[in-house]
Amino acid sequence: MSGDTIETQISAGARSAQDRTSEAAQAELLRRAPVGLMTIDLQGKVIAHNDMLALWRGWAPDEAPGALIGENALGWLSAESRERCVALLSTPALSEQQFREIVIDGKTMSGDLAPIILNADLVADESGQMLVHVALIDATERGRFERELIEARRSADRANDQLHDLQERLRHQALHDPLTGLANQALLEEQLGRMLLAATRSEKPCAVIYLDLDGFRSINQECGHAVGDELLRIFGRRIQSVCPDGGIVSRLGGDEFGLALGPTDDSELRALTERILEQARLPLRELIGDRPLSASIGAVLWAPRPGEGAPLARDFIAAADQAMYAAKRSGKNRATQCMWSDIVGKW
């Protein structure tokens, strides 16, 4: 050590202090562990133990440290469990051995028997003497912990389910019209985009329809907003009743509605717009009396061609909107239908 530099001596001293601090921290951690821990010899004599074990044996907290040293831990067991542990300890320990999750019966301070879970490690100390490090867990307490753990997991599952439901509700609210429950424009564009992409692969046409109700503004003013809202809900249901499977109906705002349709053709699209016009003309005397109601419709069909990219969903909807205004300019209560290829770049 005399040949060491001052720096080396200081470094060695610092390491020694750190080691002592670490050992003290570990000892304190074991002393305060929430399960009973002890070290015994092969005859069962207690050499060291933590506070929890002493508390389990009935000692007061201020008396717990060292209270059990020298006792024979085998005396805390039922006769059958004591014989079982003696047999384990008498097994030739030529190398390290472990015993895990062994259920034994221990005597409480009142003399009653209670199940205990034993975990033990047989190790040799520096002199070669075999010692046993033991952890004793009150099985009734463990059962309570396990039940609490199960309940905590169930609570977490319920919380996850509630979070999933909330996320679904928020998504639904974000993508649906609150008045009619129909899809909104964001969802229409999302679904139409998928239909357009599918059409490029299948090379089958798809279509979009844009419509509004003729005369709705005057009805809303004369009959009140409550009547106008109910009219929109009824008309939304009517459109849904004639929409083909796989299509999506949306309310775009005010009295404007949109439909996106998967594989279809010119004649099917024309027939659908006629059915929508018929639905709009159906009387609602109990709601608006004899006031007339009709619809103006714009419908655009896109027939994919090899090598041609699909239009953007918002552009496709905008084209149908322009076709709807063409129907209005032509006198309302009618549908204007065209091909995407005939109008692209013209509006």
Image (cartoon, rainbow, N blue to C red):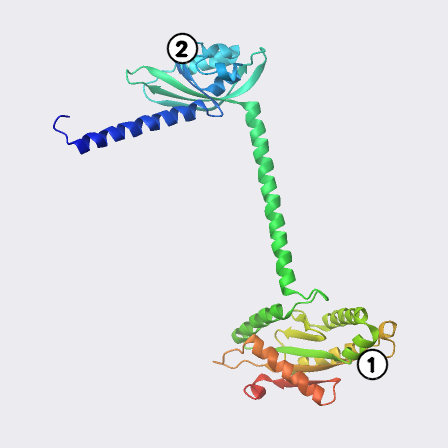
Residue 133 position by quadrant: top left
Q: Quadrant of residue 217?
A: bottom right
According to the picture, the residue beneath numbered tag 2 turns out to be 43
| Viewer can see residue 72 | yes
Q: Nearer the viewer, residue 74 or 25?
A: 25
Q: Position of residue 284 (x, y in %)?
A: 84, 74
Q: Residue at x 81, y 70 (%)?
A: 227
Residue at x 85% of width, y 75% of height: 288
Q: Residue 189: percent from the left, percent from the top?
A: 59, 71
Q: How many numbered discs sit on the rendered protein?
A: 2
Q: Quadrant of the N terminus?
A: top left
Front residue of this view, candidates 187 and 104:
187
Which of discs 2 and 1 lies nearer the camera? The answer is 1
Where does label 1 land, which residue?
292
User: Mark 2 vs mark 1: which is more N-terminal?
Assistant: 2
Amino acid at the residue labelled 2: Gln
Q: Could you give the CA–CA distance between mark 2 and mark 1, rounded to whole angstroms?
A: 103 Å
Looking at the image, is 148 positioned above or below residue 173?
Answer: above
The correct choice, above or below, for 81 with respect to 18 in the image is above
